[in-house]
Amino acid sequence: MSRIEALAERIGDIPITTRNNVVRGKSRDSFWYSPILKEKLKNVTAEAIVSPRSEEELLRVLAACWALDIPVTPRGGGTGNYAQAMPLAGGVVLDMKQMNRIKSIGEGLLVVEPGAVLSKIEVETREHSGQELRMHPSTRETATIGGFVAGGSGGVGSVRWGMLREPGNILRLRLATLEQDPRLIDLTGDEIAIVHHSYGVNGIITEVELPLAPAQDWVELLIAFDDWMTTVRAGWAVAHHEGLWLKQLAAIQAPAPHTYFSRHRRFLRESDNVLCILAAPNAVQPLLDLLQKDGGRVAFHSGRASEEDRKGLPHLYHLTWNHTTLLALKIDPAMTYLQVGTPEKDPLGAVEEIAQRFSGEIIGHVEYIRAAGRLYASLLPLYRFSNETRLMKVMGDLEAMGCACYNPHVYTYEEGNHCDADPARLDLKRRTDPKGLLNPGKMIGWENPDYSYDPTGTYEFAGLHKTAP
Ligand SMILES: Cc1cc2nc3c(=O)[nH]c(=O)nc-3n(C[C@H](O)[C@H](O)[C@H](O)COP(=O)(O)OP(=O)(O)OC[C@H]3O[C@@H](n4cnc5c(N)ncnc54)[C@H](O)[C@@H]3O)c2cc1C
């Protein structure tokens, strides 16, 4: 009997499938955004998909996987970009989407199971009491709350509330451990940060408690400018005005808007650089007054657009965050992206230098983020990929300029987050996953606790080859 047959026998009526097309589909996430990961991980596949419907079922699955030494990779909507949800060592993918109940909605508070899809949560919270999530990734319609907490970092809403990691943006997490007798543990305070963005390596999230914000009828604006740096500076200036209630603010450089935003193209000129904005209704007029003084032209205003104009348009946030890359990739498969933190001292100077030095290779994309009382110009620029050597050279040059590159073309936590092995994450993992069965291959520190950050991004998980057909 194979280990998967033994697992099926142990878990009884809990849904499990080994159907090839399902297993193959659910063994992949949005790793193909990276031409490097796309090639490296194309043969990665699980052996089975298991879909627990409750904490009790999940604990039974985990106990069986412990007994049979089966690796377990949790999965929400599968929209992660760095192969976070891909089963590098085979084993089981835990499809968490059946655990999707909203447990309670209170004033400013939500308790929810991890498999709930973000847009569905917001339908409920709006109907219940006119509230919404503080932030969501631009994959709001497909991503789950568990996947966002375990794999994401911020998004639409971060211009006001900061990234998910900011204190107060996640209030409590409940985790299931992978031990002989799996336990449920509630984490608050500092331990939340150790589980957030850890790719599920130190426990399966079974419950999330989050703050809610008052919902608004967000007005969508595309403000066009002739010049890139005027656009970036105008965005920087309005983002500083905390009295303007914004939910999203991004600057995107020409020619990307006209070339890649195919359904908004009819409102744009080829030379347009744009600010993509979601503003509360009471912020729109003062915002427009400021931006028009800077030379901005209102290319699209959802409050003024006719029904005909709005027909077939995606949400405006589908032009931002990593949707910008998706739109570019659809039209030009050579495009991929970088994740770049600008130096605190002169962030806009770095944006300008990048535009000058890498013209034709990098197209600018700034996401404005507020965190701990500061404003950041975080870059998600489009990058025209030629080969890996050139990509690494460009990232090296950006680092030499004082930027920090969070390499999105690697699958390990440390390489992607520009950090050494993290003792706190490792310590929790030793307590929650002593056999190292949770999402193997994603944390270098598990194999090498002394690992120091290596910008070459060349780490290879030894267990990976076992999964190739
Ligand atoms: C077009 C596009 C746009 C994007 N925009 C953004 C953005 O704006 N902001 C952003 O942060 N990210 C963004 N991303 C990345 C991704 O969409 C988000 O991180 C998203 O929140 C992931 O949710 P998911 O349910 O798809 O998670 P998955 O991809 O399924 O999983 C993500 C990680 O979480 C782990 N995981 C899933 N469920 C659990 C659980 N219950 N317990 C423990 N671990 C778990 C998985 O193992 C994996 O490591 C984007 C991706 C794409 C393709």
Image (spheres, helix red, strand yellow):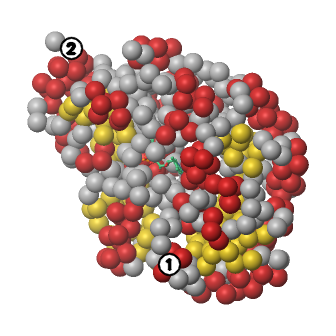
Residue 348 makes an appearance in the image? yes
Tell me which corner region of the image, top left, top right, bottom left or bottom right, holds residue 422.
Answer: top right
Task: Classify mark 1: helix, strand or loop.
Answer: helix
- What amino acid type is highlighted by mark number 1? Glu
Q: Nearer the viewer, mark 2 or mark 1?
A: 1
- What amino acid type is highlighted by mark number 2? Ser
Q: Which residue is mark 1?
A: 308
Is disc 1 surrounded by few (<14), some (14 to 19) or many (20+) residues within 10 Å? few
Is disc 2 surrounded by few (<14), some (14 to 19) or many (20+) residues within 10 Å? few
Tell me which corner region of the image, top left, top right, bottom left or bottom right, holds residue 229.
Answer: bottom right
Q: Which residue is mark 2?
A: 2
Q: What count of labels does the image hold?
A: 2
Residue 422 makes an appearance in the image? no
Q: Position of residue 234 (x, y in %)?
A: 79, 71
Please give the name of the residue rendered at 32% of the width and 50% of the height, measured from the top-left corner: 115
Q: Quadrant of the N terminus?
A: top left
Task: Classify mark 2: helix, strand or loop.
Answer: loop
